[in-house]
Image: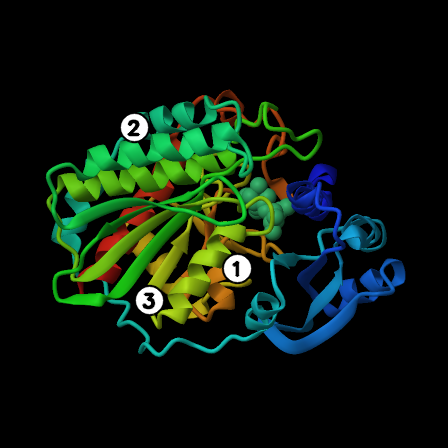
Amino acid sequence: MRSDLLKLCLFSALCLSLAATAGSAKKRRAWITVGDAAFQKVQTVAPDAVSIGSRQVRAAGLSEKVHAVVLDESRLLAVTGAIHQQMGQCGGFMYHGSEAEARAALEARRVALRTPAYTIDQREVVVPMLSSMQEQHIASTILSLSGFTNRYYASQSGVDAANWLLATWRELAAGRGDISVALVTHKAYPQPSVSLTIAGTDLADEKVVVGAHLDSILSFRMSDTARAPGADDDASGVASMTEALRALIASGYRPRRTLQVFAYAAEEVGLRGSQEITRQFKQAGQKVAGVLQLDMTNYKGAANDIYLITDYTSSAQNTFVAELAAAYLPELTVGNDRCGYGCSDHASWDAQGYPVSMPFESSMARDNPAIHTSRDTYENSGSQAAHALKFARLAAAFMVELSGG
Ligand code: BES
Ligand code: ZN
């Protein structure tokens, strides 16, 4: 069970959607996708809420009906309050800016790509790469990112953090014509996502993707100038990913499949950055061999080193990730756990039918109590980055083994 603060996640995320659109006098409609049980609660406080479509969704052996729902935006607060009061936990939701988006979210057509071979045969590349990776680099990135006042999706410092990361990744890519670094702008809010792409040599139309979220938030009293360091959630994931990238580029490795990494905007307000990106992938018919999501990598809350999240992820790819850990990080222990809802950007990829995994820092029962508060600092993760280094190494092995063969 998650902490009380986190139980308010749905509430705060939808508050933010409201804040973003405040000032418009016109009545606006909002769309959400929500599970059947939560939808029953929605109807008690928003009689105008209508299911415009539904689909049976299977995740981790469980099956639940999910509805696309349209309602008056002014009812969102009452709706989220009711879900929290009556369900006692996050119902799991996605906010959508239009009916078309909500309907598309219900569909889960698989993008045609044969299941990758999931072989582990790049040891001569991976082993030296992993030993070149350093805790200190990760610590430095976490400190830089958590040094911004906040990385809120609607604030100037959220934009500044994106520009800082853009410049940092550009430095990593300097002198390499096959690497491009770019901002991915989002129409509805100021914070862009950041992306780095290494062109594949001979399977360039297939991608391997690694992501983490750039934004941060406070559960209560969020504002443009509030302090939301987000050191663990999720500067740690961005920092792990950046160190994997640094080592990979420094080694001179050239992937056969195209490698792309994303620092997503606006995760904390309904997975909005990753939703936009994954929808564009699907619309473009982009083939993806596999996706890895790193959200919270530096707080060791439980006995195992790594917990693979089993819901809204690919079980075949999760098996491969566990095999990568056994092959390259045999000193680590790996367990399984589930979020119970689409708790991070992996759910956006899963919703579009792409195979995704999320290795997590702790069990859910012992998750970091400081996230979404001003206490989510490097110090509160023990002033170390040794835990995040494990995830950086796993990500580097994933990138090479999936893009190389
Ligand atoms: N990193 C968290 C998700 C998380 C927190 C996973 C604790 C496991 C343990 C993520 O940034 C987040 O806060 N997600 C939201 C949901 C999202 C749909 C707005 C949440 O969990 O409240
Ligand atoms: Zn969060």
Residue 387 placed where, x, y %?
Answer: 41, 35
Residue 360 placed where, x, y %?
Answer: 48, 47
Q: Is mark 2 within 8 Å of ligand 1?
A: no
Q: Amino acid at mark 2?
A: His
Is 38 placed left or right of 370 in the picture? right
**What is the crowding at mark 1: few (fewer than 14 residues within 10 Å), some, or many (at least 20)?**
many
Quadrant assignment, res 33:
bottom right
SS assignment at label 3: strand
Residue 180 in sight in this render: yes
Residue 235 placed where, x, y %?
Answer: 44, 34
Is 140 placed left or right of 49 in the picture? left
Relative to 405, does residue 89 appear above or below in the rendering? above
Mark 2 vs mark 1, foreground winner is 1
Quadrant assignment, res 205:
bottom left
- Residue nearest the viewer, comparing 269 with 203: 269
Q: What residue does disc 1 label?
A: 347
- Residue nearest the viewer, comparing 180 with 131: 180
- Disc on the earlier residue, 2 or 3: 2
Q: What residue does disc 3 label?
A: 288
Q: Amino acid at mark 1?
A: Ala
Q: CA distance from mark 1 to mark 3?
A: 15 Å
Q: Amino acid at mark 3?
A: Val
SS assignment at label 2: helix
